[in-house]
Amino acid sequence: MNIIAVDDEKYLLKDIEKAIREAVTSATVKGFRKPKDALEVAKGNNIDVAFLDIKMIGMTGLELAKKLKDINGNTNIIFVTGYSEYAIDSYSIPASGYILKPVTKEAVLEAMKNLRNPVELKSQKKIKVQCFGNFEVFCDGKPLYFSRAKAKEVFAYLIDRQGAFVTTAEIASVIWEVRTYKKNLPDQIRVIISSLQKTLRENCAENIIIRKHNQIAINKEKIQCDYYEFLKMNASAVNTYTGEYMSNYSWAEITAGYMQNRSK
């Protein structure tokens, strides 16, 4: 389940995110202080539930709700505000709930019980990524087959970037080893990324990949990875590391050198 929260006040947004994560532990939760950033993410990702502050500078929660509904009519809207007089206004938009601040776990749970468009909670399959030696991906213990080798390599690079967003230009530079786009390269990269998303969606979990306009990243929280455990200095991962990191990709040599120095 993908949930977004939008509030232009930094600390109130953190409180809303915290309450949502406590109430819906299996969901992917993203917070935004700028409505336009939330819209950009919604265009490339299926948003199941949106918790929106009504009174925001530049674009109100009511206006944002309408735009989100235009993108995906099944997105559940839950309004969040400190002003009870806005309740009547919110009813002009098909909303699933209305929560007064401060937002609590209990209020979120109650709102989630009354969604206009119920969301089926799918069991999350466990995806395991092996970076030591050759790069491999396993879903529920079985090797994951990628129909396109470049899709697997793009996924490896996103793992290497540890959840940081990368642009298509960066992917082209690193994986295709080009500094300037060839005429059809942007379209080719989009096809590869779509293939990667399709593979993950059909075999593991659709919310591992996060897309924004011309940018892509992975959700580290959904992945079990020996490299990430090594960075945490997990004893088991450190002992498993034998000096090889994503050996099938030349661009991984920089990270491999870093790990070699750290392991000494």
Image (cartoon, rainbow, N blue to C red):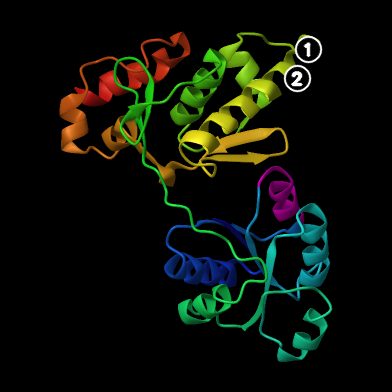
Task: Judge left or right: residue 188 versus residue 136.
Answer: right
Task: Judge left or right: residue 71 versus residue 175.
Answer: right
Position of the N terminus, as image quadrant, is bottom right
Q: In this view, does 59 lie above or below 111?
A: above
Residue 44 is a magenta residue: yes
List x then y, in percent, for residue 75. Answer: 70, 61
Residue 136 is a magenta residue: no
Most common SS among magenta residues? helix
Q: What residue type is labelled 1?
A: Asn
Element marked by disc 1:
loop
Element marked by disc 2:
helix
Q: Magenta segment range?
A: 36-45
Crowding at mark 1 (Cα within 10 Å: few <14, some 14-19, many 20+): few
Q: Which amino acid does label 2 sit on?
A: Asp
Q: Mark 2 points at which residue?
A: 187
Q: In this view, does 11 lie above or below 168?
A: below
Task: Judge left or right: residue 60 versus residue 74.
Answer: right
Q: In this view, does 155 lie above or below 232?
A: above
Position of the C terminus, as image quadrant, is top left
Q: Nearer the viewer, residue 106 or 76?
A: 76
Q: Name the residue under label 1.
A: 184
Please tell me which residue is depicted at 54% across the width and 29% down the height of the picture: 199
List x then y, in percent, for residue 130. Answer: 33, 26
User: Residue 52 appears in which quarter of the rendering?
Assistant: bottom right
Crowding at mark 2 (Cα within 10 Å: few <14, some 14-19, many 20+): few
Please tell me which residue is depicted at 64% across the width and 39% down the height of the picture: 211
Evaluate if marks 1 and 2 touch, with contact meaning CB atoms under 8 Å apart: yes
